[in-house]
């Protein structure tokens, strides 16, 4: 583009100077806090190493991504996935480095399922012989895998899957078949155009036993590893129809697919047989080992989602805090002088109440993510020794926290976007892609409303045990809480967390725990004592799961002040983190005030004091906001946001994107309806558009 007079124009307010002043106004040590948050496994050093390499490669440039069509995004996604494999080998990088590449590249790669669900399933459910055969091929990318569980007619209800795997006792083979249209595998990532092989979850059908028995009966769902495309032509094998399902919210580079089978035959070895076997001689079905270990990979994935939520929300909050600090609108309404400058948007309480509690939430999510990491690893060690005791508690906690954390992050991204006004709606916000992509998380790996039923069932069981034997030695914190609740239920004095403008941190923890225990007792009463139908209780049980998970966030955050290095951080950082704890807790308490008063956790007359306390906490936090988001160490390359640039050049970047880098501005159009021509001088008569419809 030719130079023009706008090349020399500057914004009225200097964004760079504004952010520098904000940073100078807080004496938080950003590097120290960043290492406190992200030091495990060399995260910060690894991130820098990977960003340095990817940001120099033209293939990973992001400024034109939103101008590409869906098919073009898949082409680019596959090209990047291949390039990352070449880079990893060229640089001699580890698997952790590869995962960092995926994170920094920030798109759902067509290879993603290959190294997550596909390899994990083979590793955890394949026999030693199957692993010896398949794992080298998987790790060397000689084959590309996907995970085909969800169907057109069933997602969460895995037991209701319609695809069948029928055992042929004569040929010693399985016949994979889709008896209904709704049996079509659907939504399965990497399956549409990329995968050569699939883990297929199907109903195992075996001949009925007995002399007079005819027909087949189901032995539940089992996993099968099946080749779906030819190794040379990459065309579907006979008896298989497979393809991409088309456009969707987010995940543009991912080829989510559909697949149906027409009596497709596979060898017996296709069934993963570490925990289940079909006998060649008798056709008998045998389960091996403890069936509960199958939950391991699911719990691991949910744990990963919980830990990732903090970084996703931190990205949105980083953009919102930086931009709302630079953006100015209106003078103070009580201003007495026309010379007064317009106010920073982040100085308005109506903006603070949307963004600063979310800033506090990122830290609440962090400490709970760390808890989940430690809880998972400790439980896996116990399980590997043959003790499956911790599994139920782990499964319950991971289910409830996955539901809560993904809702907080998904809703938080959109709240940040709206808080930024009109520019939040534009592509330069950097939130369009992350907003669309993250919308899947409240649904995948267990729908957020469905999996809370599992949490509630676990809590009802725990409360039932506590009622039967309230003095038994507690096995875990939940039992201990329930026993305390039962002992004190009849003489509970509702708490007040704010006294004369002073906040009682211990009382905050108490009221969150009491509410969770009281709601658990009410669910126990309704289900066990009064025998109410489960379906009628489902809304109540969802609220129970959320309350239980919120008390985990609050308790874990509070415990961090005494059990982690939080207290050893320098300067004002420990007290600022305590302000974050209080703001997250009081904001949540205020939002769900009726739940806290109805459970006798807090006194109704203490609720009005929360509003002023929250305002005071936001005033305390405001000077540190920019440095707090800086501590999440999100590189500009990953942030990909004109509004959230670390150097504050918001308006310069927005204008450059529009004026110099927008391909639409390089074409001159014919806008007059009397001419069918679209591009001026082309004489195309609109045929170019018709060809694409």
Image (cartoon, helix red, strand yellow):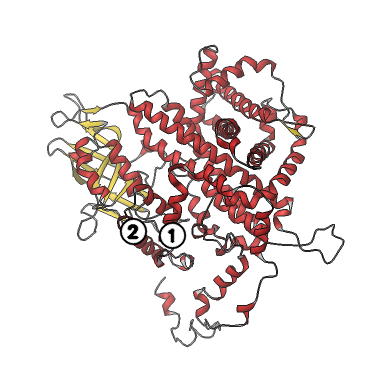
Residue 84 placed where, x, y %? 35, 58
| 57 sits to left or right of 92 | right
Q: Secondary structure at mark 2?
A: helix
Residue 51 placed where, x, y %? 44, 58
Figure quadrant of residue 169: top left
Is 276 or 562 nearer to us in this picture? 562
Is 11 or 151 nearer to us in this picture? 11
Q: Which residue is mark 1?
A: 52
Q: Residues within 10 Å of mark 2 (few under 14, many from 20)?
A: some
| Res 619 label | none
- Separation (CA) of disc 1 from disc 2: 12 Å
| 30 sits to left or right of 241 | right
Residue appearing at x 67%, y 55% in the figure: 24
Q: Quadrant of the C terminus?
A: bottom left
| 435 sits to left or right of 604 | left
Q: Which residue is mark 2?
A: 87
Please give the count of numbered marks on the rendered protein.
2
Figure quadrant of residue 209: top left
Residue 111 placed where, x, y %? 34, 53
Q: Secondary structure at mark 1?
A: helix
Nearest to the eye among marks 1 and 2: give it.
1
| As drawn, 507 above or below 54 | above
Is 293 or 40 nearer to us in this picture? 40
Residue 191 placed where, x, y %? 32, 53
Res. 387 visible in picture = yes
| 377 sits to left or right of 129 | right
Residue appearing at x 60%, y 47% in the figure: 29
């Amino acid at each position: 583009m030719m130079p023009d007079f706008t090349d020399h124009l500057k914004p009225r307010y200097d964004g760079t100077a504004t952010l520098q002043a904000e940073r100078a106004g807080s004496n938080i040590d950003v590097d120290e806090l960043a290492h406190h948050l992200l030091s495990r496994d060399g995260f910060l050093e690894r991130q820098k190493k990977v960003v340095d390499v990817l940001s120099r490669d033209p293939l990973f440039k992001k400024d034109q991504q939103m101008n590409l069509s869906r098919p073009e995004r898949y082409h680019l996604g596959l090209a990047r996935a291949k390039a990352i494999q070449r880079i990893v080998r060229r640089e001699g990088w580890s698997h952790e480095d590869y995962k960092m590449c995926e994170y920094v590249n920030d798109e759902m790669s067509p290879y993603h399922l290959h190294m997550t669900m596909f390899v994990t399933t083979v590793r955890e459910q394949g026999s030693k012989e199957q692993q010896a055969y398949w794992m080298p091929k998987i790790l060397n990318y000689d084959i590309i895998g996907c995970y085909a569980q969800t169907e057109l007619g069933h997602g969460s209800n895995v037991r209701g899957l319609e695809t069948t795997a029928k055992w042929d006792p004569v040929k010693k083979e399985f016949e994979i078949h889709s008896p209904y249209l709704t049996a079509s595998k659907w939504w399965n990532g990497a399956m549409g155009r990329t995968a050569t092989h699939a883990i297929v979850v199907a109903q195992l059908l075996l001949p009925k036993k007995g002399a007079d028995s005819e027909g087949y009966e189901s032995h539940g769902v089992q996993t099968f590893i099946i080749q779906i495309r030819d190794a040379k032509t990459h065309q579907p094998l006979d008896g298989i129809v497979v393809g991409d399902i088309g456009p969707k919210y987010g995940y543009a580079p991912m080829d989510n697919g559909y697949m149906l089978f027409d009596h497709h035959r596979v060898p017996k070895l296709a069934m993963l047989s570490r925990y289940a076997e079909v006998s060649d001689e008798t056709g008998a079905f045998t389960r091996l080992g403890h069936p509960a270990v199958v939950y391991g990979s699911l719990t691991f994935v949910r744990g990963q989602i919980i830990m990732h939520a903090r970084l996703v929300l931190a990205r949105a909050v980083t953009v919102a805090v930086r931009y709302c600090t630079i953006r100015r609108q209106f003078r103070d309404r009580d201003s007495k002088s026309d010379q007064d400058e317009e106010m920073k948007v982040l100085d308005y309480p109506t903006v603070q109440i949307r963004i600063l509690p979310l800033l506090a939430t990122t830290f609440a999510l962090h400490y709970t993510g760390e808890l989940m990491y430690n809880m998972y690893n400790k439980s896996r060690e116990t399980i590997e020794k043959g003790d499956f005791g911790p599994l139920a508690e782990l499964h319950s906690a991971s289910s409830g926290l996955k539901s809560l954390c993904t809702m907080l992050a998904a809703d938080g991204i959109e709240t940040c976007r709206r808080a930024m006004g009109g520019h939040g709606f534009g592509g330069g916000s950097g939130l369009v892609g992350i907003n669309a992509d993250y919308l899947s998380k409240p649904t995948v790996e267990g729908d957020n409303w469905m999996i809370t039923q599992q949490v509630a069932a676990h809590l009802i069981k725990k409360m039932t045990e506590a009622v039967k034997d309230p003095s038994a030695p507690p096995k875990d914190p939940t039992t201990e809480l329930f026993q305390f609740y039962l002992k004190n239920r009849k003489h509970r004095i509702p708490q007040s967390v704010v006294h004369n403008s002073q906040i009682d941190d211990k009382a905050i923890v108490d009221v969150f725990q009491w509410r969770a225990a009281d709601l658990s007792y009410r669910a126990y009463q309704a289900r066990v004592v009064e025998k109410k139908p489960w379906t009628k209780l489902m809304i109540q049980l969802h609220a129970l799961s959320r309350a239980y998970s919120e008390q985990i966030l609050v308790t874990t955050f509070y415990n961090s002040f005494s059990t982690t290095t939080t207290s050893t951080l320098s300067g004002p950082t420990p007290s600022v983190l305590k302000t974050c704890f209080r703001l997250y807790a009081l904001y949540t308490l205020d939002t769900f005030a009726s739940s806290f008063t109805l459970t006798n956790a807090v006194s109704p007359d203490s609720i009005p004091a929360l509003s002023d306390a929250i305002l005071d906490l936001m005033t305390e936090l405001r000077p540190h906001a920019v440095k707090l988001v800086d501590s999440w160490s999100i590189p500009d390359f990953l942030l990909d946001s004109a509004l959230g640039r670390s150097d504050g050049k918001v308006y310069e970047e927005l204008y450059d994107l529009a004026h110099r880098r927008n391909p639409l501005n390089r074409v001159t159009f014919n806008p007059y309806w009397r001419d069918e021509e679209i591009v001026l001088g082309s004489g195309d008569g609109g045929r170019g558009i018709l060809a694409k419809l």
